[in-house]
Image (cartoon, rainbow, N blue to C red):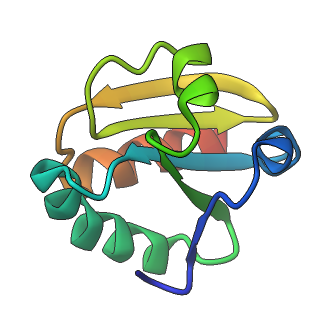
Amino acid sequence: MSGKINELDSAENFAAITQNGVVLVDFFATWCAPCRGQLPILNAVAEQFDGKVAFLKVDVDNFQQIAQQFGIASIPTLIAFKDGQVAKSFTGIQQEKTLVASLNELLEA
């Protein structure tokens, strides 16, 4: 995992991490093959937005309550937060250009 992507360590930290600025949250599971396929793309995007966007991975097996709160029915699901509010949501593997365009749009808004 890239040093630019943090993994959630406690449910209490989720709100604090997502409340300010733009944060892209990757809901995943270690056993999920598509989630593993999303990771290199996420690492590339995180490199491009270093210092501008925070990146957080949330293991749905370890944080089921958070996954339920956001209606995560399939993984990978990526949710972009802006100042604590859900701004965009993506289900399934997303290409780099899609994520880059969406994050640029949120940063400009």
> Where is 51 relative to 99, above or below?
below
The residue depicted at 51 percent of the width and 39 percent of the height is 105
Indicate the position of residue 47 as horizontal and vertical percent values.
46, 80
**Residue at far bottom of view:** 3
Q: Nearer the viewer, residue 62 or 90?
A: 62
Task: Report which quarter residue 37 is drawn in.
Answer: bottom left
Task: Report which quarter residue 36 is drawn in.
Answer: bottom left
Indicate the position of residue 98 as horizontal and vertical percent values.
26, 45
The quadrant the C terminus occupies is top right
The residue depicted at 86 percent of the width and 43 percent of the height is 12
> Where is 66 relative to 33, above or below?
above
The residue depicted at 58 percent of the width and 39 percent of the height is 63
Answer left or right for 71 relative to 108: left
Q: Nearer the viewer, residue 81 or 100?
A: 81
The quadrant the N terminus occupies is bottom left
Indicate the position of residue 28 as horizontal and vertical percent values.
36, 47
